[in-house]
Image (cartoon, helix red, strand yellow):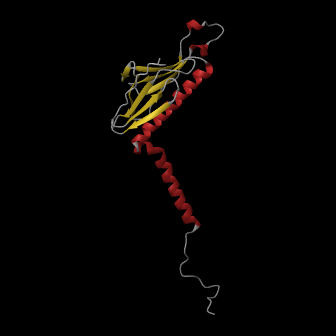
Amino acid sequence: MNRPPPTASRPHAAGFTLIELLVTFAVVALIFAIVVPNLGSFLPSARLDGSCSQLQRNLDWVRSEARIQGKRMAIELDLEKARWRIVFPPEQQLTREQEPDTLEERKDVWWDLEDGVMFLGAGDAKNGITARGLYRIDFDEYGFTGDQIVMMTLATDKKLVWSLLLNGLSGQVTREESTEGHEPIPQVVNEGAF
């Protein structure tokens, strides 16, 4: 038997040391910490997705709150400044010293769309699409509204058009995405439309 003596060292041991592995993991973690939060600037559609998702969640929330509270609520879109806010009913501010007729609606703070995202337009089939001024989506005390559409795009790439289609009676908000610049046309609904 030709066994090497136990004190003899091997020429080169295979593998990595614990220090080398820790340094490698630290560098990879640092790269992820820098890159992941800035993915929106690398992928233009990610900014549109973020803005659409946030507005869609808030449309669902306002509709739900209108039904739960049994009060009218709304979302106001500032189409020129790329921002929106929630409009609460006047009754939420009522104190014993006030009369309901003297109250005004309470308006939430403005929420900006993500950088470079802008409203392309909003509207319905009855009144058409508008691209300027304030546009208001009203929900009645049952959470119903008219069929509405809200379109967003990027200031740098007008071919990306993300649209939120709000079905007034069901409250369902669906999203349509176009990379060719196609704007959906709202359909006229006579029965049950507001």
Total numbered badges shown on the rendered structure: 0
Quarter holding residue 154: top left
The residue shown at (41%, 42%) is: 41
Q: Position of residue 25 (x, y in %)?
A: 54, 59
State left or right for residue 81 relative to residue 171.
left
Residue sitting at the far bottom: 1
Above or below — where is 86 with respect to 103? Answer: below
Q: Position of residue 169 (x, y in %)?
A: 52, 23
- Give whichever of 120, 26 is nearer the camera: 120
Q: Position of residue 183 (x, y in %)?
A: 36, 31
State left or right for residue 135 relative to residue 104.
left
The residue shown at (63%, 88%) is: 5
Where does the N terminus fall, quadrant-wise? bottom right
Above or below — where is 134 with respect to 35? Answer: above
Residue 135 in sight: yes
Quarter holding residue 44: top left
Residue sitting at the far right: 96
The residue shown at (49%, 35%) is: 53
- Give whichever of 74, 98 is nearer the camera: 74
Residue 132 in sight: no
Residue sitting at the far front: 191
Above or below — where is 71 with respect to 118? Answer: above
